Image (cartoon, rainbow, N blue to C red):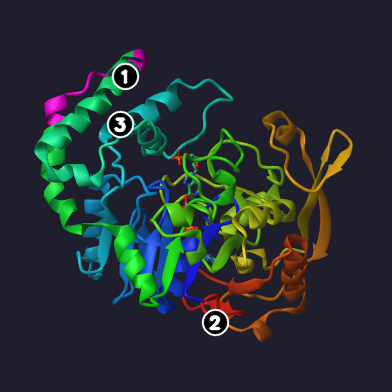
Amino acid sequence: MANVVVVGAQWGDEGKGKIVDWLSERADVIARFQGGHNAGHTLVVGEKVYKLHALPSGVVRGGKLSVIGNGVVLDPWHLVKEIATIRGQGVDISPENLMIAENTPLILPIHGELDRAREEAASKGTKIGTTGRGIGPAYEDKVGRRSVRVADLADDATLEARVDRALQHHDPLRKGLGIEAIDRDALVAQLKEIASEILPYAAPVWKVLNEKRKAGKRILFEGAQGALLDIDFGTYPFVTSSNVIAGQAATGVGVGPGSIEYVLGIVKAYTTRVGEGPFPTELDDADGQRLGERGHEFGTTTGRKRRCGWFDAALVRQTCATSGVTGISLTKLDVLDGFETLKICVGYDLDGERLDYLPTAADQQARCTPIYEEMPGWSESTEGARSWNDLPANAIKYVKRVEELIECPVALLSTSPERDDTILVTDPFAD
Ligand code: GDP
Ligand code: IMO
Ligand code: MG
């Protein structure tokens, strides 16, 4: 297969970064197609640990083209800092191997301020628990047709006109929330200053990718977040502000839907969530505590403690359907080592009725209680296992049951943060 899309199949932090880094050895181009620096991806390669937010996770391998697509919202000041940090770790990043779509909307300081002010002003039950990075307000400006985009940085008059258009909208909003007025000239000056650092990377990505595709190059489309945070199919309104599911890969870079041949869903062997919103299998007991501790479940972007719970097969079956997942990568299996009994959610009880999917209405989601099936755990260690034969019998049974319940095969299995502690079952790039 020439092209593979990687998407998170839960609420994010499934281990997409590790898997994209691992798979990128087989790809020519790695393209981010949505989200922004709300993402946090940790890559462990030998002694080195890379923490990526805006940069595609293929960037640490040499000889690949990394692309930031138009479906992303980009904070240019953050990107410049992230490039400097990752370069400081010995990674070569230049316009030769990093490209930013010219039609990418920018995240401006006013977006982060608005995001945080709204969260502070929110009453109990309406707070989303965002990353505070301005993602929602930046996407609002995109669909409101008042974004400043990468291409606007190239011409001073255009840039000023675009900033004025955005401020026409933001000035009254800020006033209403009690945020100080914007210094328009200072913002324009800041943008003009950063322009020279961003423009060398700007390119018509749709054109470059279409040429690569025609030349038979392999493209790896990298999704951020997870399908349950999708603006349409997630647990709305406790979601992010972009489409996260695989269909977004095409519009987020400018290729046709037929360019995508394989969708790899990244699935954690249990469930976690950061921020507010429903989470049927959440555990508020010693088992939840144990998952959090063994899995080091703290956010890469905000450092917040992640909420933890049992594996929810009903939800993953649903996200495999909305993304058309071909195969999954099951990650963090090792975190389940040592549990005497494991529970898997196979459906929900809603007011006495059994459901095999999570309903859409928020009040119904809140009333859904999980229906569990139990499986015996294993006492042996799976940490660092690199072959299927190294797995204990009960771990294999667990993986097989997950496959059955979500109706999707396991293509890859991950047993530690380290790049090479990965078991290949089926190569997503194989013809
Ligand atoms: P992403 O946002 O989907 O890229 O995931 P994050 O990087 O935010 O969170 C996943 C965390 O789990 C990172 O710290 C990874 O290093 C780590 N990780 C990934 N795969 C495994 C695994 O198989 N086992 C363990 N123990 N940790 C893993
Ligand atoms: P990666 O790519 C986990 C969550 C936030 C919040 C909601 C909205 O590392 O998997 P936003 O700032 O996007 O408006 O916040 O979405 N969220 C994530 N949770 N992993 C992520 O990314 C996330 N990106 C956003 O915690 O609940
Ligand atoms: Mg993450």
Whether label 1 lies within 8 Å of ligand 2 gets the answer no
Estimate the spatial distance between the alpha carbons at disc 3 and disc 1, rounded to whole Å: 16 Å
Q: Is 7 left or right of 181, judged from the image as shown? A: right
- The mark nearer the N terminus, 2 or 1, is 1
- The mark nearer the N terminus, 3 or 1, is 3
Q: Amino acid at mark 2?
A: Asp
Give the SS element for disc 2. loop
Q: Is 189 left or right of 267, judged from the image as shown? A: left
Image: magenta residue range? 176-186
- Give yes or no for residue 47 being in the magenta stretch: no
Q: Amino acid at mark 3?
A: Arg
Residue ID for mark 2: 431
Residue located at (39% from left, 49% from top): 71
Question: Could you say which disc has been placed on residue 146 in the image?
Answer: 3
Dividing the picture into quarters, in which one does residue 170 lie? top left
Estimate the spatial distance between the alpha carbons at disc 3 and disc 2, rounded to whole Å: 43 Å
Q: Are marks 3 and 2 in contact (CB under 8 Å)?
A: no
Residue in front for this viewpoint, 127 or 365: 365
Residue located at (39% from left, 56% from top): 254
Q: Amino acid at mark 1?
A: Arg
Residue ID for mark 1: 174
Give percent across and percent down for residue 258.
51, 64
> Relative to 209, is 132 above or below?
above
